[in-house]
Amino acid sequence: MTSTFPDPHTVPGLACETARPDSGRAGRIEPHGIDHIPDAERHGRPRDLFSVWAAANVNYLSLVIGGALVLMGLGLWQALAVIVAGNLFWVLTGLLATSGPAAGAPSEVITRALYGVIGNRVNNAVGGWLVSVCYFALNLAAAATAAFALVEKTGITATTGVKATVIVVIAALTLAISVYGHAMIMKLYLPITLALTAAFAVVAVAVVRHADFSYRPAEPLTGTGLWAVLLAGVTLIASGPLSYTTSADFSRYLPRSASRRAVAGWTALGAFVPSVLVSSLGVLAATVVDMSDPQSALQRLLPGWFAPVFLLALVLGTISINALTAYSAGLALQAVGLRIRRTVSVLLDGTVAVALTLYGLLASGFLDTVSNALQVIVALVGPLMAVYATDVVLRRNRYDGPALADESPASPFWYTGGVNRAGATALCAGVTAAALCVNTLYTGPVAAALGGVDLSLPAGMLVAAGLYALLMRHDPALRAARSGA
């Protein structure tokens, strides 16, 4: 396949920064945006990805979700089984990460092969930027709550002004990592992983000592009710890995020759192991304390001296998650078509997220509304993940990075009017199927007919993947990729 790659110096916003030979150094701001990474600037090893994903998943949210499974009515072993099943979706996140070294481009650009140059802008605006900023705001709110408690322990009253300052400081630390970019993330996340692992090891010892391993709910679920909660639990757990359709963002600097199995394996393993272990601690804690207020409940199980360390670990874990989220959101904003530098787009994302957090925590219950909306967004991220994973398999992970960077009508990924109808149709069909089966904020007709059983996750993903494979079978660009042309 032949292609023309526009010079980033002559197309404003394509590279957004001028590439330099030192782009892999952690002490310098990453020069690349959504532009293609030349082979000469590739570096690193697939195993470096383990700490990136581990640091992002040794976190407070996993503890909360684990406790929520027990609050939903599941027994100890049922909840643990759900955690393992839901976290298996990290395999798909690992599969998507393999497209990064193949294309030398972030996910936000690779998905032009799925939806077309123009269609992908819509995908990035909704499935990339909007969802990422909402998650950023929710995670920032969670970190701020822990930080407020930490401030109170120092004797300072958490007034409105103090709370606002805390939120801004946490956001600034997060955005500093995101602005410096890929090399800084790769350098910092190993020590962050080690620090968080040490902190959560203390939590694990305390929780296991108090846990009731014979726990059973007072009124065990049976029949349709049990299946409904089991599927809802798997969907809740799976929403984490399914939201990371951007895993190629962090693998794209690896050499083109990097082992696909290693890239997929270290990505999936780095997320799967901590997610399972930390969520399981949440389940064990819920057998002896009320996890409806997890922060206070967990502190009753922990040694008194460790409480400030625990709160600090919660803040650090959330910063590590949000740094990845803000980094990808910045790339998504560029991919939407805004001709701005990556550093500017990251700061813009952070500003919007901070505004949402301040409004939600200090002015209204806005974040509750956003949180509920994100539950329904699983109906979107599932089909998004399915279409992307199917394309990687169909294309045998052969992506032409320079051709993907071409946004002109001459691009092989322009399709019809800038839209790949196969990808758009498959995604819309998958989202529709999921919406008919959902049972969260509302009950879809299929869920109602099944007595409340929510099949939105499997239905949306299977319909999207199957229809995309069917509609793309005659696509010339895909055929060329499969043949190695």
Image: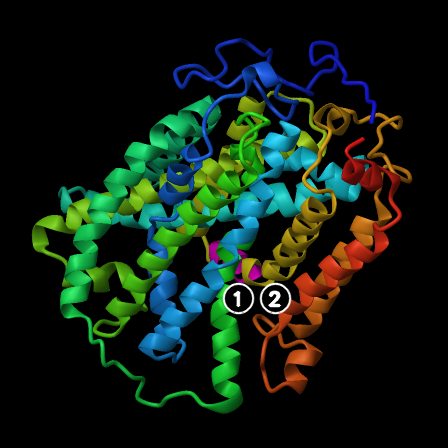
Please state if 435 lies on the left or on the right of 214 as rendered.
right
Relative vertical location of residue 175 with respect to residue 299 in this rendering, above or below: above
Tell me where residue 333 sits by quadrant. Answer: top right
Q: Quadrant of the N terminus?
A: top right
- Position of 464 compared to 130: left or right? right
Q: Which residues are magenta?
A: 367-373
N-term mark: 2 or 1: 1
Q: Is residue 371 in the magenta section?
A: yes
List the residue tagged with mark 2. Answer: 457
The residue singled out by tag 1 in the image is 235
Foreground of the two, 278 or 16: 278
SS state under label 2: helix
Q: Who's the residue at 20% across and 44% down the image?
A: 198
Number of residues whose C-alpha sits closer than 10 Å to that of mark 2, classed few (under 14), some (14–19) or many (20 or more): many
Binning the other alpha carbons within 10 Å of mark 1 as few (below 14), some (14 to 19) or many (20 upward) gives: many
Residue 69, by quadrant, is: bottom left
Percent x, y of residue 113: 76, 39
Amino acid type of disc 1?
Thr
At a point 67% along the width and 61% down the height, the residue shown is 461
Amino acid identity at mark 2: Leu
Can residue 96 be seen?
yes
